[in-house]
Image (cartoon, rainbow, N blue to C red):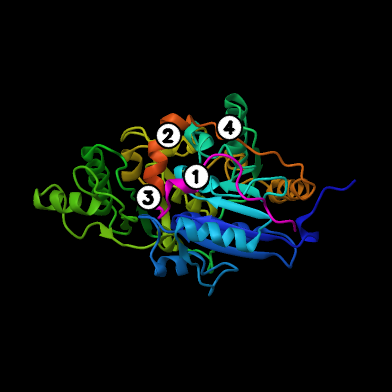
Amino acid sequence: MSDPDLGGMDLTVVAVADTEQYVRLSAAMFDALPGHGHTVGLAVVRSPIAPAPARLRGAVADTGLAGRRVPVLTLPELRRLIRRRVPDVVMLNCTARVTDALSGILPTGRRRPVVVSTLPAPALPAGEHEWLHRSRVDLLVLHSLREVTAFAELGEKIGVGAEVALAGTPLPIVREPRRARPHRVVFAAQDHVPAPPRHRERILEALADLAENRPDLEVVVCPGERRTTAPGGDYEELWRSLVAAGSVRDHTVLFRAGPVAAQLDRARGLVTVGSPTALEAISMDVPVIVLSDVGDDAGATVFEDGDLFGTLDDVRAVRFRVPSPRWARENHFHPPEREDWTRRLAELVLRTRRGELPARPTLLDESVHRRARRRILADLGGAPSLLRSGPRAPWPAH
């Protein structure tokens, strides 16, 4: 018997996201569905972190959802949408606690939808909380062989019944070849990273030294999207303080807003403390330095054993790195034929159509997490009664 193939199925798939990053992931997953005739719909759950309309349009601009409206809905509205559409698959592509809250409103029963969730890349180190809040999903989709191994081992250890599968890493579409003579050094800044303000100042001072000593290079800081107030000030505030103190000269370093990928076409190298932007740079053949001497950052875990770590002195000397082939294969640059998430999804759809897919209980301690769930429900515009225990209304037959 041949493996099931989504290309031979007509599926209805509803994805729910809560941030711009998860909107991009959802659209990329839709584009990866093989075959034709699938009915797909994407909605954003209304919350304090929901992206603005312009950012929503930008997030799907280069995908099959380009030009389509992505509605922002409250939790009760999402519940009505899912019951009206009767999807075969519901993708809960949200942050951990929101995924947990949304899984509590889905119908149960023998013909329930297959529940899928994903994590943005890089997702290492594997976090127990990510699994616990997704313990009711059927399929967790990750984007590297190393992530699949780590989450599968952790899931087995804590008793999660979900399957783990591999997808490609959604990376920016490069429309033009990189410039033949790259002359730009780009620093991908992240809010709160590294945590001590003095470490962030040291990075800026090293970039200023580079700009002073190498006038042939353009040194650019991409501040990124500021979500919270960084202790001691964000990078632009810290730069102004260093200029005022006479530690650096103004205009030696340029600050440019917008996606870091837009700065990489002319980049000689990318500097980061552990940003996912390093994966974008590697995909565009831009050398990288992942800083190792300005404090530890969990976001740098993925780069271990990749020959990518360097110091601020390496930045000053323009000693950038390229990853080892072995590391690249295990970390997001695997052969496409290793990707199996659509095949795993097809198997799960067949099982639920035969009424063979079991309910997946939460692994969270209800008494401990009840108050947190109530807060999340309030943020999502829902009432605690939406998460009542016991069986919900039966799922309609297909």
Residue displayed at 40% across by 70% down: 54
Q: Earlier in the sequence, mark 4 or mark 2?
A: 4
> Disc 2 or disc 1, which is closer to the eye?
1
Q: Which residue is mark 2?
A: 369
Instruction: Residue type at mark 1: give it.
Output: Leu
Residue 390 painted magenta: yes
Do residues under tags 4 and 2 come within 8 Å of each other at their CB atoms? no
Residue displayed at 72% across by 42% down: 357
Residue 331 painted magenta: no
Dominant secondary-structure state across the stretch colored magenta: loop
User: For this rendering, which residue is in front, 117 or 355?
Assistant: 355
Instruction: Please give the label number shown on residue 387.
Output: 1
Q: Which residues are magenta?
A: 379-398
Image coordinates of residue 50 in percent, x first then y, are 40, 58
Image coordinates of residue 66 in percent, x first then y, are 54, 72
Q: Which residue is mark 4?
A: 150
Image coordinates of residue 316 in percent, x first then y, are 31, 44
SS of the residue at dot 3?
A: helix
Q: Residues within 10 Å of mark 1 (few under 14, many from 20)?
A: some
In space, the residues marked 4 and 3 are separated at their CA atoms by 33 Å
Instruction: Residue type at mark 3: give it.
Output: Ala
Task: Give the quadrant of residue 224.
Answer: bottom left
Instruction: Residue type at mark 4: give it.
Output: Ala
Residue displayed at 55% across by 62% down: 42
SS of the residue at dot 1?
A: helix
Q: Earlier in the sequence, mark 4 or mark 1?
A: 4
Q: Which residue is mark 3?
A: 378
Q: Residues within 10 Å of mark 4 (few under 14, many from 20)?
A: some
